[in-house]
Amino acid sequence: MGMGGGGGTNRAVSEINVTPLIDVLLVLLIIFMVIVPVTPKGLDALVPQPPKNKDAEPNKDTIVVSINGAKGGPVSYLINTDSFNKSDIEPKLQQIFSVRQDKVMFVKGDPDLNYGTIAEVIDMGHQAGVDNIGIITPKVAQGN
């Protein structure tokens, strides 16, 4: 509305001045645009891929440590198909990975086990010098 130049009545203007609100909105928009990360960061996942050819035999160089057992029951440890005691796993992994260039290991745990049991094997792998440790879930094991 225009500004009158005298002679009129002095009425109060009942309109909101939106200019400061637009300034605040633009500042908030710029702040949120700067805060949003440009690229998402995360961990690289390493999952064993099923063979493309069903008749092909699995890679013999792949090390899979399997932990079998039920909650509260006896636990058995396998490296590929060889059975080991818990205390023998770390020395065997050190022996295996001391001569390898590619230090990749997979851990497959029974779904009924506590995660702490599986975490101990992951820690043994780290102590043996394994760089990449993948966890095989039941869905990956089925090949879906």
Image (spheres, grey):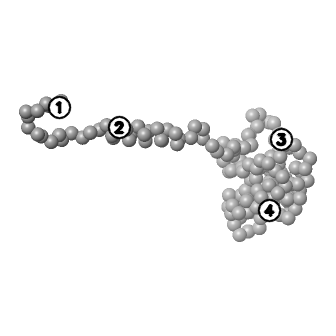
* Image marks 3 and 2: residues in contact by CB distance under 8 Å: no
User: Few, some or many C-alpha atoms within 10 Å of disc 1 (few <14, some 14-19, many ≥20)?
Assistant: few
Q: Earlier in the sequence, mark 4 or mark 3?
A: 3
- Neighbourhood count class around disc 3 (C-alpha, 10 Å): few under 14, some 14–19, many 20 upward: few
| Mark 2 secondary-structure assignment | helix
Q: Which residue is mark 2?
A: 22
Position of residue 71 relative to residue 104, above or below, is below
- How far separated are the C-alphas under marks 3 and 2? 63 Å
Residue displayed at 85% across by 59% down:
89
Circle 4: element type: strand
Q: Residues within 10 Å of mark 2 (few under 14, many from 20)?
A: few
Residue sitting farthest toward the bottom? 72
Q: Measured from the top left, where is residue 63 in percent x and y?
A: 82, 48
In the image, 144 versus 54, the foreground residue is: 144
Q: Earlier in the sequence, mark 3 or mark 2?
A: 2
Q: Judge from the rendering whether residue 67 lies leftward or rightward of residue 139; answer left or right.
A: right
Sequence order check, earlier mark of 1 and 4: 1
* Amino acid bearing label 2: Ile
Residue marked by disc 1: 3
Badge 4: how crowded within 10 Å, few (<14), some, or many (20+)? some
Residue identifier under label 3:
59
Residues at discs 3 and 1 in contact (Cβ within 8 Å): no
> Which mark is on residue 76?
4
**How far is disc 4 from disc 2 in space, using C-alphas?**
67 Å
Q: Residue at x 77, y 58 (%)?
A: 123
Label 3 vs 1, first from the N-terminus: 1
